[in-house]
Structures are given as structure tokens and as C-alpha cells.
Amino acid sequence: MKSNIQFIVSMVIFGTIGLVVRNIDLTSSERALLSSLIGCLFLTILFFIMKKKFSWHLVKLNASILIFSSIALAGNWVFLYQSYDHTSIANATLGYYFAPVFVMLLSPFVLKEPLSIRKIACVTVAVIGLVFIVGDGLSASKTDDLLGLFYGLIAAAFYAALLLLNKFIKAIEKLELTIFQLGITALLLMPYVFLSSGFGIFHVASSSIPFIFILGIFNTGIGFWLFFSGMENLKGQSIAMLSYVDPFVAILISALILQEHMTMLQMLGGALLLASTFVSEIKSRKFSAH
């Protein structure tokens, strides 16, 4: 029961990211840098409080994959935060939840896993759902919404790459892995941020500062800590089911707090997209839950 609660709370925390990001007056790359840096520092402190030690020999063994997975994590956050700037949190979240579809499509080539008829059906339904969301945006001539959804899909592609790359990382404990990925992500983003934005990151509006720490400590640090703590004792099927708390919370925030409008066709498209990935996750993890 404790694991269930930890995992659900982590999903609720992740579901609030869009709302927090909207209140930070920085570029998406600057937000990504700060969230990864603060999250890394928070989890490192937690790591030492728990009296754990880094497995440097395993880090060296997985060095190349860690770098590529951190690049994927950086791209994931930059484009997701950019997506929140251009469209509703609901649309950005739905675009982002296309990631499992990318994983399904790439698995036969990367992981040598066969693409079953059921998975093909799930991909087809997900694509139909996405067409409904995009098609209604086109009919309403919401160019910015479409751009935001496009950024959400790019974020989903990077997240899919992150998931696939993490399959090749051997023996590193999940909390330790997260610390290194966040740290490397911050190091990779630093030169890009300073070359593209200069040192404007040090002149952030005072109203944004509390939300920067909320994003780094709460959404990244505590969110990931509860996520991995809860996941350790949950079966794969439970993880798949509970993961949908995240988009549910994000869509509720979009509709109830921010009063962002979704058409009936977009809601139907979103339902098809989430349902298809849900069915795929349940079925694919059912026999690998142990």
C-alpha cells in the first residue's frame, strides 16, 4: 500500500509540472537546466543521507549510454517546456503521451522485440486519436496550438529514446542512475544556455524564483524519489495503470484551474490516445511484472 501511495503521489507531482513551468519567466532550456541542476543536488543530498555510495565502476562501464540518455533527457525537457508555452497543458500532455507509441514502433529495431498485431492495433488507434487532436486544431486555425503539440511530440520522441537507452544500462541502482542523468543533463545544457541566452538566467524575475525551486526540488527531486521508491515494490501492470494519474491530473489542471478549452473531438482523440497506450502497457507488462 505504501508503494502505491508513493507512486500515485509522484504521478500527481509530475502532473503539476505544466502549471509550475508556466510561472517561470525563462526560456525552456533555462528551465530545463535549473530543474536538472537543482533536482540533482537535492537527490545527491538525499543519497548521502541514506548512507549510500556511488558505484563509480558501474558508471564508467555505462558511460557512453549515460551521456546519450542524458542528451535524450535534456531534449525531452526542453521541448516539453516549450510545448507548454505554445498550447494548453492538456494538448502538450497528450502529445507527450505519444511516447509509448514511438517505443512500440522502435522496439523491433532497437530491442529486437516483435511488433504484435495487438501493438499494431494500439498504434493505429493512437494515431487516429492524434489526428483528431491535430485535425480539430487545423479546422480552428490554431497555429500556436499545433506548434505546441508538435513540440510535445518531439519531447515524446526524446522520452522514447530515453526509455530505450535506459534498457541498455546495466546494474546501476535507479536513484543513483537518476542523479547521474540529471547531473550530466545539467552539464550538457550549461554551454548551450549560456551561448544562446547569455547570462539572463541570473536576472530572472523575483516572482519566478519560488517556482524554480518548486520545479527543481518538488517536481524533479521529490517526484523522482517517490517515483523510484514506489516503483521498486510494484508489479509492472500496477505501474502501467497508475502512470495514467499523471495525464489525468494535468488535464484536470488545464480544464479546471487554467480554464483551457478542449473541443469534443480533441477530448475523443485524447481518450483514444491514452486508451491505446494504456492497453498496450497493460498487455506488454502483464507477463514481465516480476
Image (tube, rainbow, N blue to C red):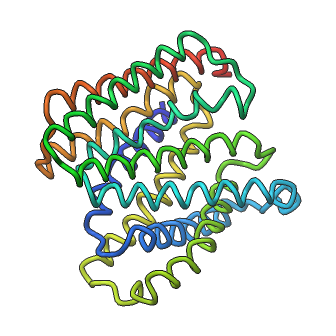
- The percent position of residue 164, horizontal first and vertical second, equals 66, 40
Q: In the figure, residue 51 lies in which quadrant?
A: bottom right
Image point (47%, 22%), residue name:
123
Q: Is residue 139 above or below residue 154?
A: above
Q: In the figure, residue 168 lies in which quadrant?
A: top right
Q: Nearer the viewer, residue 289 or 139?
A: 139
Q: Nearer the viewer, residue 91 or 36?
A: 91
Q: Is residue 145 above or below residue 5?
A: below
Image point (43%, 83%), residue name:
197
Left or right for 82, reference 287: left
Q: Is residue 44 above or below residue 254?
A: below
Q: Quadrant of the C terminus?
A: top right
- The percent position of residue 141, horizontal first and vertical second, equals 16, 46
Image point (27%, 49%), residue name:
89
Left or right for 92, reference 104: left
- The percent position of residue 5, horizontal first and vertical second, equals 43, 37
- The percent position of residue 39, horizontal first and vertical second, equals 52, 65
Left or right for 81, reference 86: right
Left or right for 233, reference 114: left
Image point (54%, 34%), residue name:
102
Q: Nearer the viewer, residue 193 or 254?
A: 193
How many labels were placed on the picture? Answer: 0
